[in-house]
Image (spheres, rainbow, N blue to C red):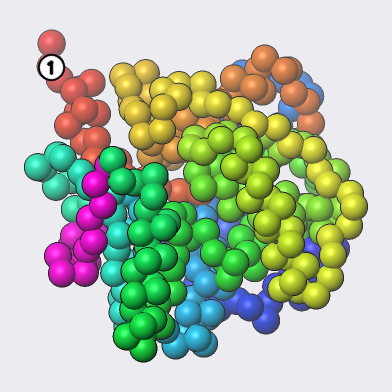
Amino acid sequence: MNSEKLRTLIKPYLSEELLRQTRIHALDNYFPPHPKRKVFIKRDDELSSSIIGSKLRKYSSLLPYLEKENFDEVLIIGGAHSNNVLSLSQVLKEKRLFFKLMLLEHHNPTLQGNLLWTRMLVNEKNLIWVKRKDWAEVEEKAQEYVEEEKRKGRRVCLISEGAKHQASLPGVLTLPQEIVSDQEKKEREFQHYFIDSGTGLSAIGLILGLQFLEISAHIYISLIAGREKEFESQLENQRRNFSQLFGQDLPSFCPSYSFHRPALATSFGSVNTKVLQETLVVARETGILMDPVYSIKHLCTAKEIIVQKELEGNILFVYSGGSLALAGFQEKLAYFFRSP
């Protein structure tokens, strides 16, 4: 499998201080027992207590790029409760890089969850609110801002939702590199991978990493947000980015993959009673506190597929992290513990 080949390729682009290898351990206790199946979990939640693991991977190559280019400002696009907005704000503050946030307006007068933590980090003067009716054109609005600042002699780097930037690619490739390295050390192979997708970059990184190493497996992608065509378009863009960045083309081989809508609360951002109930079940069965917006939906989707398809072999569930988001659901979760 030769994970060293991929590590050598991406290492020059990384700030290794941001990353450490996360563990993989068995997760069989959540799934119905099967004599020919073993389920494992990749614990990227353990990369940081307050920064989403998959985001930290992206920043491990994005941050060196931002520091090298010495931009006057970084403009981050995202929702008011965005994991990426909160996570990237922390890293940029740490590195003393000036930034502003272009956020989707919200109507809830109560500050809670990610928005509360973000407001603790960022002053009002550094927030640009975009009305919901105008959100479809947010990229155009952000680009207009960048061009306006350029006319003033200022260089602004635009970071799209989910840290979707060409400089993030080497960072997301650390995920498949680590997984394959673990396989080599443990002398086991995964036949099935489960990964969630918001903006899609982490899932794309997994595909490209396995493609580069020519590893045959099937990747099940939980489409928590976005659409299949958008994902496919971004995948092709990142294939071109890979060739330009590393000066070589990917092999013609590509691992197989499929898209799956969430088994619970299919609308992005929606969290219903079933999702919250499953959050408690997961905590009791696995000892893991998972966020209900992304990870619980992802895990339930994986469970449904594994059972319905009667999958066999070694299965890896990628958990990107995000338990901090549970703070936004404390009252609703506490409801289940009310005295009769």
What is the x, y in percent for residue 293? 38, 36
> What residue is rendered at 48% in x and 37% in y?
225
Q: How many numbered tags mark residues here?
A: 1
> What residue is rendered at 39% in x and 50% in y?
137
> What residue is rendered at 31% in x and 46% in y?
134
Farthest-out residue, left:
109
Quadrant of the image occupied by residue 75? bottom left
- Left or right side of 338 for 83: right
- Left or right side of 65 for 277: left
What is the x, y in percent for residue 216? 85, 43
Q: Residue flagged by tag 1: what amino acid is it?
A: Ser
Farthest-out residue, top:
340
Magenta stretch holds residue 129: yes
Residue bounds of the magenta highlight = 117-132
**251 relative to 228, above or below:** below
Question: In which quadrant is the N terminus drawn?
Answer: bottom right
**113 relative to 155, above or below:** above
> What residue is rendered at 39% in x and 74% in y?
147
The residue carrying mark 1 is 339
Magenta stretch holds residue 41: no
Q: Nearer the viewer, residue 73 or 321?
A: 73
- Left or right side of 109 for 16: right
Q: Secondary structure at mark 1?
A: loop
Q: Is residue 280 visible?
A: no
Question: In which quadrant is the C terminus drawn?
Answer: top left
Q: Nearer the viewer, residue 215 or 152?
A: 152
